[in-house]
Image: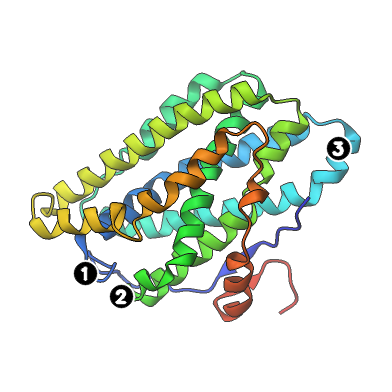
Amino acid sequence: MTDLAVRRLLIDLETPIERHWCGGDAFRSAFFNALSMSFPVGEQFFIDSVRDGFKALPADKQARYKNEVQGFIGQEATHRRIHALFNGHLDKFGLVNKWGPSARERLKVLAGADRRHGLAITAANEHFTAIFAEWMLQNHDLLNSCEPRLKTLWLWHSAEESEHKSTAFDLYLALGGDHEWRIKWFRRITYIFLSDLLYQTIDNLRRDGTLWKWSTWKSAASYLFGRRGIIRKNYRPWREYFRPDFHPSQQESDLSRRWLAENTTEYSLVGAAS
């Protein structure tokens, strides 16, 4: 059980952002833009899955998870709102969010399904976001050339993803979810997540006019597969999810807590006295 604080990020998302806001790098900007495009629909699905799973718990287990679930929902709702604001800038660049609508259509097939399916899907996605978040917190210097407010946005989001990465997983187990279905959904989500991320990033670059530039492909190779590449460094933690005895807490570090403690001026606590 985890106490999850809900925080309001104190950055300006009204002022326009640069097209290549990530240090002038077309690939990195397109990659993070693609991730952001998935968040409003994804975060809403995670909220609904966790809320529905919580309601299915017996009363004694509800008491145990109540505060954590409320914190999870509050954090994800804040992420959804912030990224919707960020995505509004992307619309002005002529980028088209295909990931969000396609994900919404796919998820309709789960209507009326066992609540554990939604939780298994959420847990699988949360594993992806958690290991990416840990990587970003470890390699925060790679964002030093980005607009400071946007660097703050991504590191704040990363810190909170690391914080609540166990919630859906624990609810899945509490409802009797088994290892077999957890892994089935993880395999599917791995394919869907990476395919959608690749497709949306490529579409962003195509609309940006930078898809076939040598600098774009050089940046992609380095950022994904280089010495500190996001895929190269996350393969091992991704694989650990397949272990029967896996739990997200096994990949704990103090990076999330440290960032939140060192950056208290960047956010306010929702419901806290001002």
| Amino acid marked by disc 1 | Gly
- Image position, residue 159 (x, y; %): 56, 62
- Image position, residue 169 (x, y; %): 66, 38
The quadrant in which residue 28 appears is bottom left
Cα–Cα gap, marks 2 and 3: 46 Å
Image height check: is 44 above or below 116?
below
Q: Residue furthest right?
A: 60
For label 2, the SS is loop
Cα–Cα gap, marks 1 and 3: 49 Å
Q: Residue at x 64, y 39 (%)?
A: 246
| Amino acid marked by disc 2 | Ser
Q: Is residue 43 visible?
A: no
Q: Earlier in the sequence, mark 1 or mark 2?
A: 1
**Disc ID at residue 145:** 2
Q: Is residue 129 visible?
A: yes
| Amino acid marked by disc 3 | Lys
- Image position, residue 200 (x, y; %): 28, 42
Image height check: is 192 above or below 68?
above
Q: Which residue is mark 3?
A: 61
